[in-house]
Image (spheres, coloured by chain):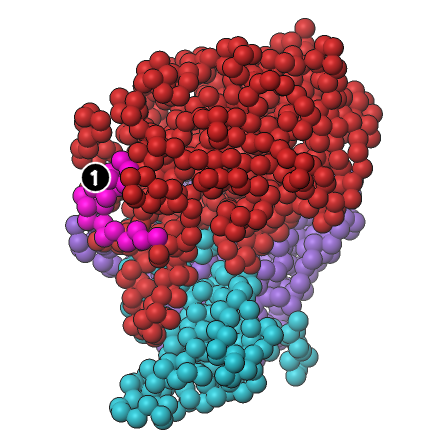
Chain colours: A purple, B red, C cyan
Amino acid sequence: MNGTRQAELNRPVDVKRLRDLLQAAVELELSTIPPYLCALYSLRPGSNDEARLIIRSVAAEEMLHMALAANVLNAIGGEPRVTGVAHVPRYPHELPDGVMLDLLPFCPEAVEGFLKVENPQYPHQGAGPGHPLVAGRRPERHLARAAAVVGGPVVGGTVVGGTVVGRPVTSGPATIGAFYTEITDGLKETAAALGEQALFCGDPARQVTREYYYAGGGSPLPVHDLASALAALTEIVDQGEGEPASMYDADGDLSHYYRFKQLAYDRSYLPSDDAGAPTGPPLGVDYGAVYPMIANPRGDDYADPGLRAASDAANRTWSALLRDLEAAFNGRPETLLTAVPAMFRLRDQALVLLANPLPHSGGRHAGPAGRMRPPRRRRILSPNGPMAAPPISA
Amino acid sequence: MTGAAGDGAGDGTGYDVVIVGAGISGALIAKRLTTAGLRVLVLEAGPATAWTFDGYSAHLGHFYAAAGKGPESAWPPAVGAPQPDTADVRTGHGYFVQRGPDKYGSSYTRLLGGSTLHWLGVCLRMLPEDFELRSRYGVGRDWPIGYHDLEPYYREAEWEIGVSADVADQAHLGIEFPDGYDYPMHALPASYSDQVLGKAVNGMRVTLGGQPFALRVRSYPAARNSTPRDGYQPAGAVDERVDGQALARDLGQRCQGNTSCTPVCPVQAKYNAQKSLAQADRRNLRVIPQAVASRVLVDPVSGLVTGVEYQHYDSPDSPRHVRRTARARGYVLAAHAVENAKLLLASGLCAGSRVGEGLMDHPALYAWGLSPEPAGAFRGPLSTAGIDDLRGGAFRASHAAFRFDIGNDGWRATTGAPDTSVAAAVSGRRMFGSGLRRHLEETLPRQVRFSVAVEQLASPGNRVTIDPRYVDPLGNPRPVISYRVDDYTLAGMAAATDVYQRVFRQAGIEDHTDPAEGAWFPSATYEGRAFRYHGMGHFAGTHVMGTSAADSVVDADQRSWAHRNLFVAGSGSFPTMGTSNPTLTMAALSLRTADQMIKELTR
Amino acid sequence: MEPLAPDGTAGFAGEAMAGERAERFLAMSAVLTGYGRVQLTGTGLTAAYLRAVDASLPGGVLDDLLGAFARPRARAGKRAAGDDRELGGVPAILDDPRLGPVARNVILLWYCGTWTALPDDWHAAYGASRADTTRVVSPQAYQGALQWAAAGAHPAGARPQGFGAWSAPPEPAPSAGAGA
């Protein structure tokens, strides 16, 4: 690390900075989800059953991580945000360690990207501008808030809606694990300096617990003190990279990194395997049985009005999902009950897009763009007859 | 499958208990006994194809591709362990030999997991009065135990299975819960159509036998994962793969509303008996699938069981098998009401008793119609609520009680909708294009259906027997069924028909019930009216429990009177059925039996 | 398995270049079903359905049906005035003894994911293909069948709506023709 970073670490961490870091963590976890979902939904129905289970399990755990980060942020009096231009991820999306997240169909490049996200030591190529998937266009990349918050001064960048666009001169944390270490160190220091109770002043009613969250991969721990905050953050790192000395997390499941290695090798790990190549039975990965989604779909440039309408509908559902998540993270955890059906609706709308070829794209297909749209007022039928009502989820 | 310590592999020695059958009774008993340190061998007639998640998914794929989507459409049987199929009821050809005069309409599944693989998941307790029909109403017979004897085991069964309900909604018709008790999970959210129907119907009055009743749409306790209460972790899918990561266990932690509980829950959010087997103490458990128990061996002097002969077949597609014998200190037959009776008869056991007599079912009526407003059909669990108020009352002295199940699946079960609705519009009415689309969008969501389960009493003429002329590919007898729907039940059907029509009228539901339009079902006639009925898959009565060997096969612990180290477990032990799915009650009885066995075998 | 596309990429990319015949099949299906091309293509089943129809019919029948739909009045979905001998509109096609049952089967294919065997008297008059049996085309066809979307629901046993979704009032169906 360079001298500027060292100097920053010696300064006592204030609560606002901790909240900024945790907000960045929430956005970080959120930003990994659309790439996983695009890979997942691009699998042709009836194919790639093992890959489907693996990607789904990782996506579910990333959602858990997002909920855990939100719990910690809420515990120290913060207000998690996942809506609005400043917070919603856009792709390509640059993570603090320089890793680029693209929305890709399930393909070797996507798997390599996932490996890199979970463990940046992993060498990978990624989809450069000349790659056929990108179809010759590379929209401006968006820098993750995490990079902006921790990366120190940025030279030559501009602020767009609160997100810095451009490359920071000083490097951020070397890995996402290091990013979380910065948070845990900061929590310990600040708790010592201010007193644990003063730091963990958040309303317990804002915690998301297993009552409403159940995607699998574990339960969101309610956070109310330093120990529970550290446990929550440890779980995030542990499930992603694995415990320091092990390929497995505390529950005995392979960490995400090793689950993706199975996809890369198209073999499963046997309990007796070490961290090298897996030697178990093949998973049946079939990259050919995939909808060839265009990289980083936009949707606003579709000529076909039917396709634009379909893309719009998916965007509205995505926006509704994010609004529900934000409500759930801000005192109404029961809103997860409408968030889940929104996610399932998004799946159906994504499948329609993914099966539709895009003209003049070299054989690529459409896909969900993940853009925010305002809610549409819908008439909802009730036993008393049709009546205008606020949408449950547009 | 899993091995047990010192199990002497091939010839089945070294066990404390042999259990025949890996359905819910066998699985619960195996779990409880192994957890108490007893070594258990389970013989399951069918394959264990659903035990790994990709095996289970293959069953799901079978269902997707099947032309008919009945209860058996996901669960094709092995050649060596055939099973009844509801499709056979009409043709009269199938595993059952149906002597009549009426058709027995139910089926079951012979696979590891048993009928819980395809059941709906209703977990109602029997009413206190169901246990004492003879004392109260002069019909049927009394159980040797009462509701309050079984009540602690109902609670244990509800936690073993994982039942979703709120005690506040379920304490009616004499059902009581101790203070502080609640189900492990909150009731599943009511469907929109439940809510609409409830608004129209709740509080409406009907009179039966001169007694007034108020009806209410009520959520039923369901074996489907819902929001947990403190201290309960919902059990997801069973994923017992040998290699690779058991990632499917994350599935099924909540019901997703797949609307296919029967025949198959894609994510195992619904309980199936494999979950209990997976939770057993696996060091003490060995399960041998594809092992058909063919004869129970008995010492002629002591009457004690000395072994169970079974036929182990290698391939589900072939009858080729080897014969082996399993031996233990105690034995449990948990193979299903019909299979238990068949095995006892084939072994010449329980001579002089009434094995096989008193076969019961819940013959059920279908009613279907169009609700005035969209009800949201084809969504959610197959059903979430019913009308329970006519399950009990003084009228039971004259005719059967009955219970309504309110479907969420439109007319799927009754007419084969939505496919048949589309075909009627396209082929019948020559509709096409946007007109067709609008018509379907307008009518499909309005489809509603009731299924009304009508109580049946045991009668000696209704029975399972065997006949050497009728054998299956392994040479084992096929069940020969004699069955008649008697006037007590038929009068109940007539009353139920009257009530459903009033409920439809109250709710403004346009009645479309028409045998000509619906799928084929058998019928029975009463006072000039034909009642079409279907079986609920609820078998009972074939090895009835009682207070003495003179008039029953087993005692209150399900122990055979004639063979003191043999327990015969399952709904075959029921003297009466009431109007609830037998599963929760047989689970409670199984746990009670297991506790008794542990007391004796660990002395 | 799909044949390789001319550029050697894996066969499914070849669906995007489905060919003029598949385009006509899609156009006809849109008129017959009342669903737009994006929704129909969105099922991912166009090629599978086309194969199922071709396999289940004697040669030439599907092409005649596609030809009938290519005529302007049929494309517009309008009723033909008067002359039933000229297949001028969709209702006339549906009434035609040879093509009508096939057109209806195409509707059932999209809505139900099943092919329905044609009646014996049709076979006697126009020929029979051995593959003309009543069947679910594939597990994917079962799931992608439009009847579930028309019901505002989901295929039983697949693509669930999620915990609790069934408590909400059903979503009013998007109006036909909004490109959806």
Observer-nearest of A42 and B578: B578
Q: Is residue B528 left or right of residue B151?
A: left
Q: Secondary structure at mark 1?
A: helix
Q: Which range of residues does the magenta coloring cover?
A: B494-515
Q: Give the image quarter of residue B283.
A: top right
Q: Is residue B204 left or right of residue A375?
A: left
Q: Chain of mark 1?
A: B
**Residue sitting at 40 percent across and 30 percent down?**
B456
Residue behind mark 1: B201
Residue A9 % position (x, y): 55, 41
- Say above or below: B524 vs C117: above
Q: Using the rendered image of the protein, determine whether residue B169 is visible from the camera's viewpoint.
A: no
Observer-nearest of B542 and A25: B542
Crowding around mark 1 (Cα neighbors within 10 Å: few <14, some 14 to 19, many 20+) is many
Q: Is residue A347 left or right of residue B389?
A: right
Residue B545 % position (x, y): 51, 17
Q: Give the image quarter of residue B442.
A: bottom left
Q: Is residue B197 magenta?
A: no
**Residue sitting at 42 percent across and 89 percent down?**
C68
Q: Is residue A100 left or right of residue B420?
A: right
Residue A251 % position (x, y): 62, 34
- Say above or below: A330 vs B397: below
